[in-house]
Every structure is written in C-alpha cells, then in structure tokens.
Amino acid sequence: MLEAYCPPGLTVSGIELPGRGRRVGEELCYSLEELADDIFAQLQKSIAEERYALFGHSMGAALAYLCLLRIRHAGLPLPEAVFLSGKSAPTVAKAKDRYLLPREEFIKMLGDLGGCPPEILQDEELINYFEPILRADFQAIETWQHRAEKPLPVPMVVLLGRDDEVSRNDAAAWAFETSGEFQLHEFDGDHFFIQHHWERIASLIGTTLGLAVSA
C-alpha cells in the first residue's frame, strides 16, 4: 500500500464512507454530492491546521474534486496538490447505468473491470455483503450531474492506466479544472493499475510535494 513507500514527512490518512468499515452500521449513500459533504465534514478541522494534499482513485477522484470545491467555498486553505487517479474529467463523464444490471451481469462486470479478487466474486456470502455497497457506489458516480465550476488554483496530477476504459483524452480533460500546474502520468495496467505501482506513485507524490524520497 501507499504508506509503505511514503517519504519521511508524509502521512497517509484514509477516509471511510457510510456503510463500511467502522461505519458499517450506517445507511449507504447513493449521492456523490452527499458523500462529498460527508468527507468534507471529516476533513474540515485537519485541513485548517496542517499542510495536506488529496488523493483519490476512480470514484474517489471525483470525491476529491468535489471536496476541493467545498474547501474553496468555505475559504479554507487549499491543498498543495491533488492527485486524481483512474477517472475521466467531469466534463467528459459518460452516462452509464451499470448499477441497474441484473446480479449475474453486475458480478461479471466487476470481474471484467479487475481489482476484485475472484474468491470474493465466487463467494456467495461475501458477494451478498459487497454487492449493495458496490451498487451504491456505481449509482452515486453514474447519476452525478456535473456543474461547470471556475478552475481551481491547485496543482493537479492525473494518473491513468494504459489499459483502462478511461482514455488519455478523457483523463487529460482534467486540465480544464485547474488554473495551476497540470501533469498526466500513464502506468501499465487496467483500471486498478495503482495496485502494482505504489512505489512509483509514492515517489511522484513526494517529488510533487517537495519531500525527499528514500532510495
């Protein structure tokens, strides 16, 4: 995982969404905007006190972007950079309804995307647990209606798997969402390329933030 390769001075803090982890007893959320409100509430105190950056993969990238909008609106310090991975820019997001697929087709789709171990997809008990969570996530991202926003004055670093369904052009369109420096980095792999490139990603984050990276 990312924290195993982080340079000194960089601490990774994860975010938990409703209905999973320590929050498993809470209702699932089907709205990306409401999820962003939830994350912003979790981050609000710490971002007012410390240097920070945001990192999000797939739906997490969209949530990081929406959190940035909330941070700017609240007049709080903006991050030193935002790292967006495996996600098309909001202006080119394509409408899909995968969250409505019948169970067998939904599970097959998860397998085709990669990243979900076959032992989970083939285990009835596990898939009964994860299916509602995953459907909620797909519904949140696929029903989100993007509204045009003024570009953010934050350096934006976009990461992309060469074999992902997200095209290079769709990832490069994130450049329109920032008035700061923009970088696009490609990696070998599919949508879940990050699982195989944590060391390089940690090095990229450290370099972007001006932190020394261990050899």
Image (cartoon, rainbow, N blue to C red):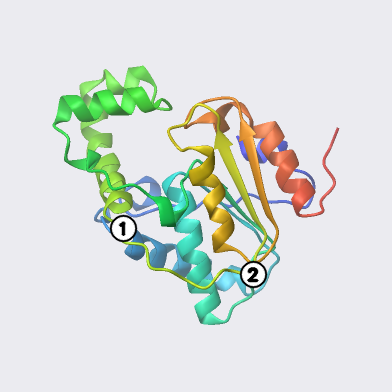
Q: Which mark is residue 94?
A: none
Q: Looking at the image, which residue sits at the far left? A: 102
Q: Earlier in the sequence, mark 2 or mark 1?
A: 1
| Residue 116 in view (yes/no) | yes
Q: In the image shown, does 2 or 104 lie closer to the viewer?
A: 104
Where is residue 141? Give x, y as percent. Answer: 33, 51
Q: Looking at the image, which residue sits at the far bottom? A: 75
Give the vertical position of 117 relative to 42 (above or below).
above
Query: Is residue 37 left or right of 29 when viewed as pictured?
Result: right
Distance of label 2 from label 1 (alpha carbons):
23 Å
The quarter of the picture where the C terminus appears is: top right
Where is residue 74? Give x, y as percent. Answer: 52, 80
Where is residue 133? Give x, y as percent. Answer: 28, 43
For the image, the number of numbered tags is 2
Q: In the image shown, does 78 or 89 lie closer to the viewer?
A: 89
Mark 2, residue position: 153
Query: Is residue 103 left or right of 115 when viewed as pictured?
Result: left
Task: Give the amino acid type for the residue marked by disc 1 in the picture.
Answer: Trp
Residue, x 28% and y 27% (percent of image)?
A: 109
The image quarter containing residue 6 is top right
Q: In the image shown, does 161 or 75 lie closer to the viewer?
A: 161
Give the vertical position of 167 relative to 39 (above or below).
above
Residue, x 54% and y 25% (percent of image)?
A: 189
Mark 1, residue position: 144
Label 2: element kind: loop
Label 1: element kind: loop
Count residues near mark 1 (Cα–Cα under 10 Å), then give few for <14, some for 14-19, many for 20+. some
Task: Give the amino acid type for the residue marked by disc 2 in the picture.
Answer: Pro
